[in-house]
């Protein structure tokens, strides 16, 4: 690792560690009395000022103002906002209802799903490593369904919602920070309205104690900081490196699920073994492609 690349590696690791440890934030709030919907509302509410600060630091205010005057782009961002709201909502519910293991499965299969989407929408090629990774993931999902006695809906909704979100954001010509701020601005009326209604009806928890207020506020930086770290690292590291590091997040989520006492049967363990095998094959394939690309560039 070169000295110049160390900050980018540190940013990538920091990003995925934060995303991997996010269940602890939501579990802590649930233990303090917050419902999943209340947590989601505070996430929508407090992410906006932190996203605005990030846009200001990046000097992207003019881009935000320009996007606000483009109805077509705003329409795409409205759709991406709906997808990320579904993703956030399902993830918060899962991590506060003893389904963190199933949530982690969704983020293991997401990059493999992205390969299929790339083939379908962008005519990208999938090599034998990619097909092997996808095949192992399909077996893992099928075994998970047998272990749960139902399809792993949480995993599938998380993977498909985040995959579709990524496709839209890939097509929309807006920087990550600017796009996030606009999405937060779309969500903030719902967050404000629900939090205000909870507090007025006496059902809110954010103002009960200083600790609860801190829990609510933490949703802002926990949402925005990893995105900033990701944007910094993605511009400086090969995509194959990012593709490998991204499996750190679901691995941490998996560990949290096991340590919190969620049911982990032998069949469920076997399903994760196939998913991990798919993730390993995916990472090896990405590494081989990056090596070939580096060799071609050197010729």
Image (spheres, grey):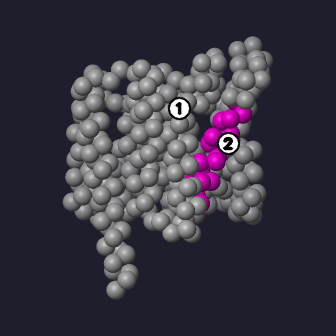
Residue at the spot of label 2: 221
Residue located 45% across and 35% down the image: 253
Q: Residue 98 got which mark?
A: none
Please indicate whether residue 142 sits to the left or right of residue 298 in the image. left
**In magenta segment, residue 172:** no
Q: CA distance from mark 1 to mark 2?
A: 15 Å
Residue 216 placement (x, y as % from top left): 69, 30
Please indicate whether residue 129 sits to the left or right of residue 90 in the image. left
Residue 214 placement (x, y as % from top left): 73, 29
Please indicate whether residue 10 sits to the left or right of residue 62 in the image. left
Region in magenta: 216-232
Residue 41 position by quadrant: top right
Residue located 46% across and 43% down the image: 249
Residue 276 placement (x, y as % from top left): 30, 43
Residue 34 position by quadrant: top right
Residue located 71% across and 19% down the image: 205
With respect to residue 281, does 220 lie above or below? Answer: above
Please indicate whether residue 24 sits to the left or right of residue 266 in the image. right
Local crowd size for mark 2, using a 10 Å CA cut-off: few (<14), some (14–19), many (≥20): some
Q: Secondary structure at mark 2?
A: helix
Residue located 55% across and 30% down the image: 24
- Location of the C terminus by quadrant is bottom left
Q: Secondary structure at mark 1?
A: helix
Residue at the spot of label 1: 23
């Amino acid at each position: 690792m070169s000295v110049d690349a160390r900050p980018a590696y540190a940013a990538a690791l920091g990003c995925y560690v934060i995303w991997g440890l996010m269940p602890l934030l939501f579990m802590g709030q649930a233990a303090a009395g917050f419902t999943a919907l209340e947590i989601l509302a505070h996430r929508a509410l407090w992410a906006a000022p932190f996203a605005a600060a990030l846009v200001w630091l990046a000097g992207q205010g003019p881009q935000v103002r320009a996007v606000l005057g483009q109805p077509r782009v705003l329409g795409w961002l409205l759709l991406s906002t709906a997808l990320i709201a579904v993703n956030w909502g399902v993830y918060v519910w899962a991590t506060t209802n003893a389904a963190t293991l199933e949530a982690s499965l969704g983020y293991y299969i997401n990059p493999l799903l992205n390969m299929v989407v790339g083939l379908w929408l962008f005519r990208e090629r999938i090599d034998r490593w990619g097909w092997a990774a996808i095949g192992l993931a399909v077996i893992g999902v099928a075994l998970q369904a047998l272990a749960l006695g139902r399809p792993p809906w949480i995993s599938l909704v998380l993977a498909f919602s985040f995959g579709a979100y990524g496709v839209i954001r890939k097509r929309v010509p807006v920087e990550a920070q600017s796009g996030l701020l606009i999405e937060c601005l779309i969500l903030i009326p719902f967050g404000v309205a629900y939090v205000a209604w909870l507090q007025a009806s006496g059902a809110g928890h954010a103002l009960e104690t200083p600790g609860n207020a801190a829990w609510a506020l933490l949703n802002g930086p926990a949402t925005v900081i990893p995105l900033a770290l990701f944007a910094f690292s993605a511009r400086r590291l090969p995509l194959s490196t990012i593709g490998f590091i991204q499996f750190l997040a679901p691995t941490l989520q998996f560990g949290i699920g096991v340590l919190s006492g969620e049911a982990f049967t032998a069949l469920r363990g076997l399903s994760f073994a196939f998913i991990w095998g798919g993730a390993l094959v995916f990472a090896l394939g990405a590494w081989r492609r990056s090596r070939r690309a580096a060799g071609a560039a050197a010729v």
